[in-house]
Image (spheres, rainbow, N blue to C red):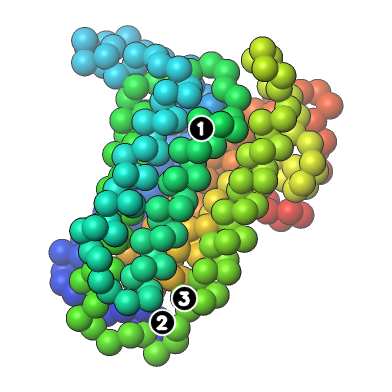
């Protein structure tokens, strides 16, 4: 059944890369639950430690805006470059390159013109996330290039994938916009988010980001893209869970019925 909607694997190396990528993303999720957070947003100043000079270097702080720009800019450039590196490939390949590029270009624009930041980011987390954001879509696009020599899956999911992607990216932007309106130009503190699905879950932007990656995986229909979508879902589920706990610890009036990620469920 699985083979009816997934391209066949080209080699054992691709299979190994797929498994390693999934395990890496799952590890990040487990680390969040265990309290070892990637150091950005509300958790930028946790896990601080002293040690070797290299460790101290990686613990260096930068502004959130610069850090977030570094997170997304390389992947955005890679997305645009993919159109020149792989100019042909048909509708599916064009849709995948477009979806990946739109996703990261949107994030760059949000960093520059939408988000209002407080705190900072730790260099080690910036480098880890930025390299991951660059490598995962780069490998995804390369694997898609390799599938051009194979027969299309029996079940074509790219049309529904485009729809899911558009819902995901639109919902993600809308809730990012709502978050940006919580603070005045000179405010730094956190507030309980309001509007949209924030009345039901504390991280609806994560929910829609997951939908975006699910849409991309449906467009791609490779084992790698599906594993990436599941891995991202695991990480963001864990991150949303610890974010909810953070709000519960900081705000006495935080509504207990507000879930972490999925309305009425989790």
Q: Position of residue 85 (x, y in %)?
A: 21, 58
Q: Position of residue 77 (x, y in %)?
A: 32, 44
Mark closer to the observer (2, 3): 3
Q: Would residue 142 appear left or right of 210 to someone viewing this image?
A: left
Q: Which mark is residue 111?
A: 1
Q: Position of residue 201 (x, y in %)?
A: 72, 45
Asked whether the viewer can see residue 30, the reply is: no
Q: Position of residue 114 (x, y in %)?
A: 59, 33
Q: Are marks 1 and 2 in contact (CB under 8 Å)?
A: no
230 over 218 or under it: above or below:
above
Query: Which residue matches tag 3?
Result: 158
Earlier-in-chain disc, 2 versus 3 = 2
Mark closer to the observer (1, 2): 1
Quadrant location of residue 10?
bottom left
265 over 175 or under it: above or below:
below
Q: CA distance from mark 1 to mark 2?
A: 36 Å
Q: Residue at x 16, y 69 (%)?
A: 12
Mark closer to the observer (3, 1): 1
Query: Which residue matches tag 2?
Result: 5
Quadrant location of residue 39?
top left
Circle 3 sits in a helix, a strand or a loop, which is it? Answer: helix
Q: Nearer the viewer, residue 177 or 10?
A: 177
Q: CA distance from mark 3 to mark 1?
A: 29 Å
Q: Residue at x 48, y 24 (%)?
A: 65
Q: Would residue 117 appear left or right of 120 to someone viewing this image?
A: right
Crowd band around label 1 with a 10 angstrom C-alpha radius: few (<14), some (14–19), many (20+) = many
Crowd band around label 2 with a 10 angstrom C-alpha radius: few (<14), some (14–19), many (20+) = some
Q: Residue at x 39, y 35 (%)?
A: 71
């Amino acid at each position: 059944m699985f083979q009816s909607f997934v391209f066949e694997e080209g080699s054992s190396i691709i299979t190994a890369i797929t498994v390693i990528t999934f395990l890496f993303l799952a590890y990040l999720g487990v680390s969040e639950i265990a309290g070892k957070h990637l150091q950005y947003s509300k958790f930028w100043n946790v896990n601080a430690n002293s040690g070797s000079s290299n460790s101290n270097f990686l613990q260096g702080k930068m502004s959130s805006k610069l850090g977030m720009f570094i997170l997304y800019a390389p992947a955005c450039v890679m997305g645009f470059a993919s159109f020149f590196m792989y100019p042909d490939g048909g509708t599916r390949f064009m849709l995948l390159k477009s979806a990946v590029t739109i996703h990261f270009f949107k994030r760059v624009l949000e960093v520059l013109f939408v988000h209002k930041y407080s705190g900072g980011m730790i260099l080690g987390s910036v480098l880890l996330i930025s390299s991951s954001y660059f490598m995962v879509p780069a490998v995804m696009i390369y694997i898609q290039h390799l599938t051009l020599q194979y027969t299309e899956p029996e079940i074509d999911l790219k049309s529904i994938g485009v729809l899911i992607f558009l819902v995901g990216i639109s919902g993600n932007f809308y809730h990012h916009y709502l978050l940006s309106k919580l603070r005045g130009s000179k405010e730094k503190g956190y507030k309980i988010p309001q509007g949209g699905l924030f009345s039901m879950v504390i991280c609806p932007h994560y929910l829609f980001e997951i939908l975006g990656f699910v849409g991309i995986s449906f467009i791609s229909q490779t084992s790698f893209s599906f594993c990436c979508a599941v891995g991202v879902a695991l990480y963001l589920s864990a991150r949303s869970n610890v974010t909810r706990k953070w709000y519960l610890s900081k705000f006495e009036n935080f509504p207990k019925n507000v879930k972490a990620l999925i309305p009425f469920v989790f």
